Structure formats: C-alpha cells, structure tokens
Amino acid sequence: MNQNEYGGSNPDFSEVRKRYEKLSRGDQAQLGKRIGSPEDLTMVPGFYKLFPGTTPSEWHCRVAFIVPFIRHSEAGTTLGEYISAQERLKKAGNLERRILQIARAIPPQDIVYLRRLLMQFDDPVINWNKSGLAQFFSADEEKNNNGKKKLVEQYFIARHSAGKGE
C-alpha cells in the first residue's frame, strides 16, 4: 500500500493486477463475468484474497470489478487512447456514445458500463496510472467526475487528432 496522489491509501494498480494474476484460477473466476456489480464482490472470497489484510472500501470494490478485464503495462497507452485505437482498427464500432454513457453515469453504474465495454476487447493492455483511473475509481464525486472527464478527453483527443484524418 502506498499514499497515492489523490490523498488515499490505495494500492498501486500494477500491484493489484500482479496480485490478481497470482490468484488461483478459481479465485480469478470468482472475480469474473458472473459478478453483476462492485458491491457483489464483498461476498466473494477471491475479493479478500486480492486485498489481503485490508478492510475493503468502495474504491477496492470498483478496482476489483475491473481488474480481470484490463492488464497494466508501463509502456501501455491511456484507456481513452486504447479505445479510440480499437475503433480505428475496426475492432469495435463507434464507441463515442458508450464513452459518453460511462461519463454521465452515476456510480456504481459507471463502472458497470466501463466493464461491459472492456469485455468487448481482447485482453486490453493500458497504463492504469497514466489513464487517471485512480480518480475514476474514487468514491469522492468530484474526483470521480475528474477521472471520467480525463477518459473522455483522452478518447476524443486520440480520435480526432490531426494525424488521423478526422
């Protein structure tokens, strides 16, 4: 655990993903597709194994809800850039509406929508920290909104940059 830039004592995303990968296949499956909302994780043993010795907060639930569907790499791009690239490569349709749906949604529905979007991609790899997801996962409304704004900005800037012809 470390003190993050947003004032909370939250684990680093790359560490959370590493812990997830070390879980047994059964524990990983418990955190997978059958979970309907972040709050459902509090009744799953695999969730507590992902954050050993920690009293989980809403932040932990939101991160654990997404961690099976997105990998971390320091060399990775931001989430918005990744989604835009998938759209350009024709691996996904027009995702503008979905991005705006995520940004406008009230927690926890925002994370549910994000997870549904991520499940469409084949094992996405991004830089969690560069993407500003710490704010997106925050229970604080202002920080959450800032994280969503960052996702929208990343997506539209990548989608409409001059070199991409749009």
Image (tube, rainbow, N blue to C red):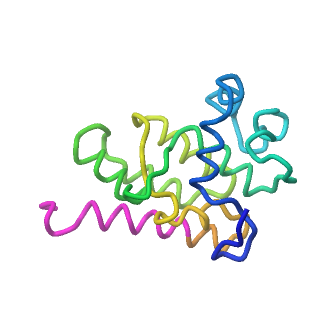
Q: Which residues are magenta?
A: 147-166
Q: Position of residue 135 (x, y in %)?
A: 61, 67
Q: Quadrant of residue 35?
A: top right
Q: Quadrant of the C terminus?
A: bottom left
How many numbered marks appear? Answer: 0
Which residue is at a point 68% across and 33% down the rendered structure image? 23
Q: Is residue 84 above or below residue 133?
A: above
Q: Nearer the viewer, residue 73 or 118?
A: 73
For residue 142, what is the image quadrant? bottom right
Q: Nearer the viewer, residue 132 or 19?
A: 19
Above or below 116: residue 26: above
Q: Position of residue 75 (x, y in %)?
A: 37, 57
Q: In x, y percent, where is residue 156?
A: 33, 64
* Front-most of residues 145 and 86: 86
- Residue 20 highlighted magenta (yes or no): no
Q: Residue at x 46, y 63 (%)?
A: 151
Residue at screen point 71% across, 28% down: 27
Q: Is residue 60 above or below residue 26?
A: below
Q: Main secondary structure of the magenta part?
A: helix
Q: Look at the image and say whether residue 149 sits in the magenta stretch.
A: yes
Q: Position of residue 112 (x, y in %)?
A: 61, 44
- Residue at image position (34%, 58%) is 81
Side (left or right) of 75 relative to 111: left
Instruction: Please give left or right for residue 154 compared with residue 111 in the image.
Output: left
Q: Eyeballing the image, is 60 above or below 151?
A: above
Task: Using the image as rendered, state which of residue 69 and residue 96 is in the foreground.
Answer: 69
